[in-house]
Amino acid sequence: EVQLQASGGGLVQAGGSLRLSCAASGFTFDDYAIGWFRQAPGKEREGVSCINNRDGRTYTVDSVKGRFTISSDNAKNTVYLQMNSLKPEDTAIYSCAAGRPDPTALCGPYDSWGQGTLVTVSS
């Protein structure tokens, strides 16, 4: 059974940092892509970043590029999202997802989702 557990959220002031963790189990971690998504109140879910564990390639959405960094620890089956210089507009529930990437895709499609962790950035 595929399981994804996101953690590390919390309340932080603008300009602060948080590191989110996505602990995975139940599948061959090295063969999957892991993505981070977020959903703010009243807004649609947005893809933030992803990493293809087959080859290490990553993608980060422009709105957080230079502030957020995704990394993977294959020994721990865990993907991290280091978030620096946080802004109030980064406030959202952050979730991770996993899936075997299509041969022509960097990440995705995703077929397993974990519960989210709330990130609140105060101004």
Image (cartoon, rainbow, N blue to C red):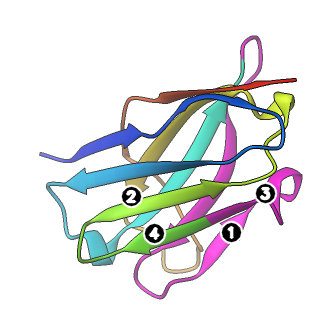
Asked if the residues shown at circle 4 and circle 2 are in contact, with their CB atoms under 8 angstroms apart, the answer is: yes
Q: Which residue is mark 2?
A: 99
Q: Earlier in the sequence, mark 3 or mark 4?
A: 3
Please say if the residues under marks 1 and 3 sit with CB atoms less than 8 Å apart: yes
Q: CA distance from mark 4 to mark 1?
A: 13 Å
Q: Identify the secondary structure beneath mark 4.
A: loop
Magenta region: 41-69
Label 3's element? loop
Q: Which marked residue is nearer to the observer: mark 3 or mark 2? A: 3
Residue 48 as seen in the image, left or right of residue 104 = right
Residue at numbered disc 4: 101
Left or right? Give the position of 100 relative to 66: left
Residue 64 on the magenta span: yes
Residue type at mark 4 is Pro
Q: Earlier in the sequence, mark 3 or mark 2?
A: 3
Q: CA distance from mark 3 to mark 4?
A: 18 Å
Identify the mark at residue 114; answer none if there is no mark.
none
| Horizontal and vertical percent position of residue 76 | 24, 68
Q: Residue at (52%, 34%) from the top-left corner?
A: 9
Cα distance between the residues tagged 4 and 2? 6 Å
- Other residues around mark 4 within 10 Å, as few (<14) / some (14–19) / many (≥20): some
The residue where tag 3 is placed is 61
Q: Residue at x 39, y 54 (%)?
A: 98
Query: Where's the N terminus, which quadrant?
Result: top left
Residue occupied by mark 1: 59
